[in-house]
Amino acid sequence: MQSFPMHIGGAAHEPLGKDWFETEDPFLGEAWAQVARGNADDVDAAVTAAHTAFTSGPWPEMTATQRGALMRTLGDAVADHAAELAETEVRDNGKLWVEMFGQLSYLPQWFHYYGGLADKLDGSVLPLDKKGFFAYTRREPVGVTAIITPWNSPLLLLAWKLAPALAAGCTVVIKPSEFTSVSTLQLVTVLEEAGLPPGVVNVVTGFGAEVGSALVTHPLVRKISFTGSDVTGRRINELAAPLLKHVSLELGGKSPNIVFEDADLESAVNGVVSGIFAATGQTCLAGSRLLVQETVHDDVVRRVVELAGTAKMGNPREETTQVGPIATRPQLAKVLEYIDIAQHEGAHPVLGGGRADRPECGDGWFVEPTIFTGVDNSMRIAQEEVFGPVLAVIPFEDEDDAVRIANDSRFGLGAGVWTSDIGRAFRMSERIQSGTVWVNTYRAVSFMAPFGGVKDSGLGRENGAEAIEAYLETKTVWVNTGAPSGNPFVMR
Ligand code: NAD
C-alpha cells in the first residue's frame, strides 16, 4: 500500500509521532493508501516553515507582478495535471470522474484570476484634514494562513482559499480532510515543481481534534479560512476568538429550491434533480428542500421522481454513471439515519429510502436517491443538513408563504427560484435570506462570483475580487512634511 507523508518546507515530512492512518476508496469499500497522522509538533514544524517563508527568502522578495506571473504558471501546471489529480479525488471521495475532472479543469482559473489581481491591490493617498502631513495606505498580506478543507470537493474548495491567499502574499499551512488528504499533497508537489518556493505552502495531515485544533491555536497563524460543517466552524471560531485571529467560515446549508406554477416545469425539474442528486447530494449548496406551489405539487413531484428514478448508479469512474457512492463510512451512517428520522417524523418516501443494493454498486457505500413528500418545514429532515441524496418536498401557497418557509431555517447558503415572472424573480431574490440566489438555474459557481452564507452558513465570502480582502491588512503611514510639533500631551 502506498504511503503519503506530509509536506513541509518543500520536502516530504514523516510524522513525528510515527503514526499513520488508512484512507479508503468509497466505491471499492477498502483502504488504498496510508497517510501520515500528524500531531501538534508536526503542526509547529509546518507553521514555522510557513513563517520563515513569509519573512525571508524568495517569497517576500518577489514583486506583486512577479507573484501574479508565477500564479499563472501554477494554474497552467494544475491544468497539465488535472487528470491525475481528479483520479485521486475519485479514489478518495468516490465522486464522479466527470465531475472531478470538470472541477480540476476549471480550477486553474482561480490561479489565473487571482494572479491577475496580485498587482492591483492599490492603497490610497488620503485627502487629510490636517496641514503638514502626508498619509497613505498600504495593502499587506495578513501573514501565515491556515486553510482547513472538507472532503466533498477537496481541491476546488482549496483553490477558492489558496489562490487569493497567495495573490495577497500570504504563506499557507493546509489541513485537508482526513478522508481526502492525498490530492492536496499531490497538488502542492505540482505547484512546487512549477516554481512555487519551498515553505510557501505546507500540508499537515491527520485528524481535526489533533492537527486542526493545534493549527487554529498556533501563535504564528494569523488567519484561518475554513470550509466544513457548522459544528466544526463554531468550534474553530471559539478556539480562534480569544487569540484574536481572523476567521472566515464556509459552512453548511439547507437550501430551498422554489418552484412556482408559472415556471418552465421541465427546466425546473432538471434543476431540482441536479440540485440534490448531482454529486450524490454531498455539496454544501445542495437544494435539499423542494418548495413547490400547491397547484403544481403533484405534477412536479411525479416528474422529479421519474427523472431521479432513471439515475444510473455505479462505478464513479465510468462516464455514464450519474450517482456515485457516499464518500465516507460515517457519512453513509448519517444519511441512513436521516432517512429513518424522516420516516419516524411521518414523511412519505416516494422514491428510494435506503441503501442501494444494485449489482453495479458492488460493495460501495451507496444510498438510493430518496424523495420524501408530506414534509413540514419544522421537521428535522427540513431543518438539518443531511449532505446526501435526500430531498424533502414542502408545498407552499403563494409568494409570501414561499418566502416564509424558505427563510425559516438557521442556514442561508443558496436558493433556487423557478418562475417565468420577471417581477417575481426580483422580488424573491430580494426577500430570500441567503448568500446566493439562482433564478431559473441552480448550482452555478464561478471564480468571479462571490460565494458564501448568511446566518449559520458562515462568515465572509469567497470568489470574486472582494475575496482577496480576507487575506489583507490595511496599514496607514503618516509622514510629517513640516507640521510644527505641538503640545506633546494633546492628540494631533
Ligand atoms: P467537518 O467539519 O467534519 O470537517 C472539515 C475539516 O475540519 C476537516 O479537515 C476536519 O479534519 C477539520 N476539523 C474537524 N475538527 C476540527 C477542529 N476541532 N479544529 C480544526 N479543524 C477541525 O466537515 P466535512 O464533513 O469534512 O464536510 C462536510 C461539511 O462541509 C458539510 O456541512 C458541508 O455543508 C460543508 N461544506 C461547506 C461548503 C461551503 O462552501 N459553504 C462547501 C463544502 C462543504
Image: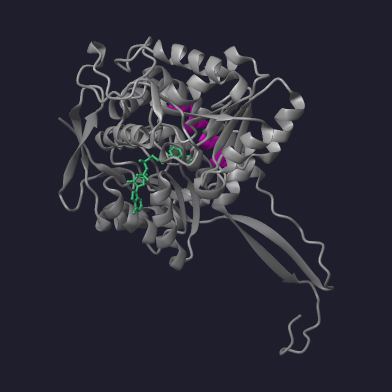
- Residue at 30% in and 54% down: 43
Q: Is residue 80 visible?
A: no
Closest to the observer, 219 or 226: 226
- Tell whether position 118 is magenta: no
> Could you tell me residue 16's position as x and y percent?
19, 53
Closest to the observer, 204 or 462: 462
Which quadrant of the figure has residue 12?
top left
Closest to the observer, 431 or 485: 431
User: Magenta region: which residues?
Assistant: 65-80
Horizontal side, residue 69 vs residue 384: left or right: right
Q: Is residue 350 visible?
A: yes
Our reading of the magenta stretch's main secondary structure is: helix
Residue 379 against residue 370 in the figure, above or below:
below
Quadrant in which the N terminus is drawn: top left
Which quadrant of the figure has residue 367?
top left
Of the four image quadrants, the one with ligand 1 is top left
Horizontal side, residue 249 vs residue 125: left or right: left
- Residue at 33% in and 41% down: 177
